[in-house]
């Protein structure tokens, strides 16, 4: 078939924008906690040393079975291999650009900075339960477990605040007011 009628994509160009993966603002560093860096490094090592070699064996076996055009194992394996290679490139780039910041080494413990665990109370809500968030790197953010990215609106509003400060920030539900109840660095 003539290539003019076939839609082809260059997968090499997609390595920076993996679907569902957070992106860094242009010109910023990729700050990470030691635990977040370790988790990315472990995923990278597992993919490169264990999963990719196994998948290459499966694809080689499928290729040896003959006609590749109708070989489901081969086609699916090649697709998975492309996806895995893309993830490996993404992780390599993130690890190469990582700046590991250990919260335990923070010297200014009175203010909120990267790595701080902050307990807050919403002033404009009936819920009296304080919430606790740790400010972490983009790749390790997990809001459901209290880990928010340092580039999130809440984390940006909290930066440089002190215990007792009242901070306003724009949330998806509108302008909110919170009080800083406690700052910890672990």
Image: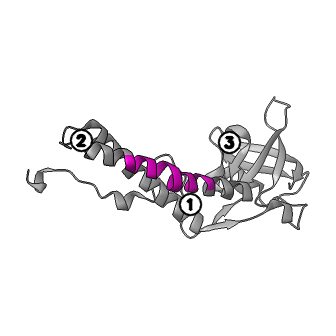
Q: Residue at x 31, y 38 (%)?
A: 73
Q: Is residue 45 above or below residue 174?
A: below
State how far apart marks 1 and 2 are (Cα): 44 Å
Q: Which x, y percent locates residue 87? A: 47, 53
Residue at the bottom extreme, as displayed: 27
Q: Residue at x 65, y 52 (%)?
A: 39
Mark identifier at residue 143: 3
Q: Which residues are magenta?
A: 42-57
Q: Which residue is mark 2?
A: 65
Instruction: Examine the image and state in which quarter residue 85 appears.
Output: bottom left
- For disc 1, the marked residue is 24
Q: Secondary structure at mark 3?
A: helix
Q: Quadrant of residue 113?
A: bottom right
Cα gap from disc 3 to disc 1, whole angstroms:
17 Å
Dot 3 or dot 1: first in sequence order is 1
Q: Which mark is residue 114?
A: none
Dot 1 lies on which element? loop
Point 72% across, 46% down: residue = 147
Q: Position of residue 177 (x, y in %)?
A: 78, 44
Q: Is residue 88 left or right of residue 106?
A: left
At x 43%, y 55%, the residue is 86
């Amino acid at each position: 078939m003539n290539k003019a009628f076939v839609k082809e994509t260059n997968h090499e160009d997609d390595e920076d924008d993996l679907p569902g993966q957070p992106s860094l603002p242009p010109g910023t560093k990729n700050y990470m906690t030691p635990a977040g860096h370790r988790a990315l490094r472990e995923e990278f090592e597992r993919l490169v040393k264990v999963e990719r070699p196994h998948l290459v064996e499966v694809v080689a076996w499928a290729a040896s079975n003959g006609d590749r055009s109708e070989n489901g194992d081969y086609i699916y394996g090649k697709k998975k291999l492309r996806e895995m290679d893309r993830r490996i490139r993404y992780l390599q780039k993130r690890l190469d650009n990582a700046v590991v910041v250990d919260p335990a080494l923070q010297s200014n413990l009175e203010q909120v900075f990267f790595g701080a665990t902050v307990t807050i109370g919403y002033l404009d809500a009936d819920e009296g339960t304080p919430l606790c968030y740790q400010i972490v790197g983009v790749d390790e953010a997990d809001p459901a477990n209290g880990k928010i990215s340092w580039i999130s609106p809440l984390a940006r509003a909290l930066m440089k605040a002190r215990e007792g400060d009242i901070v306003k920030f724009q949330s998806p539900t509108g302008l909110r007011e919170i009080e800083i109840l406690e700052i910890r660095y672990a």
